[in-house]
Image: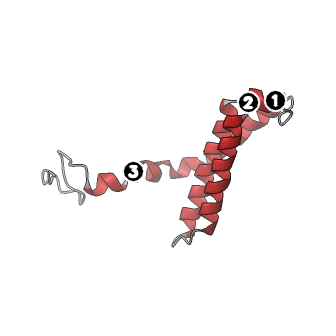
Amino acid sequence: MTRNHLNYMMFKMSMEAIKTHKFKDRNTYLMLKLLLRVWAVKELASDTAGLYEKGFFISGSGRILDEAFKSLLNDLRPHMVSLAEFSPATQTHIASTIGNEYGDIYEAQLA
C-alpha cells in the first residue's frame, strides 16, 4: 500500500504542476495530462493486490482497469510518432553519422 500511496502523491503533485503551469500551447497541457493518466493506470494495474485487500477494488475492477488502459492508449496512438521523435538532446547534442539537424546528409558536426 505504501507504493500505491507514493504513486498517488506523485500523480497528485504532477497533475497540480501541470494545471498551474502556463503553457504556450494548450495541446501541450492536454498531452501531458494524457501521459500522466496512462502512467497512473499502468501503475495501478501493476500492483493490485493491496488495493483488493483494502477494499479499494472489488471483483471486476481488473477488467475496468484494462478497458481504461486500452482507451487511454487509443487516445495516445495518434500522437506516438511526434512523442517518439521529440527529444531536445537529439536536436543538438548527439552527433549523427548521416547528417545534421537540418537533414543535410554527410554534414554532421561532431561535438
On the picture, is 47 further left or further right than 27? right
Circles 1 and 2: CB atoms closer than 8 Å: yes
Q: Which residue is mark 2?
A: 48
Dot 3 alpha-carbon crowd within 10 angstroms: few under 14, some 14 to 19, many 20 or more:
few
Q: Nearer the viewer, residue 80 or 43?
A: 43
Q: Residue at x 65, y 31 (%)?
A: 46
Vertical placement of residue 69 versus 85, above or below:
above
Q: CA distance from mark 3 to mark 1?
A: 39 Å
Name the residue type under label 3: Glu
Q: Nearer the viewer, residue 62 or 71?
A: 62
Question: Where the N terminus falls, by quadrant?
Answer: top right
On the picture, is 89 further left or further right than 7? left
Q: Secondary structure at mark 2?
A: loop
Q: Secondary structure at mark 1?
A: helix
Dot 2 alpha-carbon crowd within 10 angstroms: few under 14, some 14 to 19, many 20 or more:
some
Q: Residue at x 35, y 56 (%)?
A: 88
Q: CA distance from mark 2 to mark 3?
A: 33 Å
Q: Residue at x 74, y 37 (%)?
A: 65
Image x and y of residue 6, in percent? 66, 42
Q: Which residue is mark 1?
A: 52
Q: CA distance from mark 1 to mark 2?
A: 6 Å
Q: Residue at x 57, y 68 (%)?
A: 21
Give the total number of marks visible in the rendering.
Answer: 3
**Taking the image as drawn, is residue 70 in sight?**
no
Q: Nearer the viewer, residue 2 or 55?
A: 2
- Nearest to the eye among marks 3 and 1: give it: 1
Query: For residue 109, which numbered disc appears in the image?
Result: none
Q: Which residue is mark 3?
A: 85
Name the residue type under label 1: Tyr
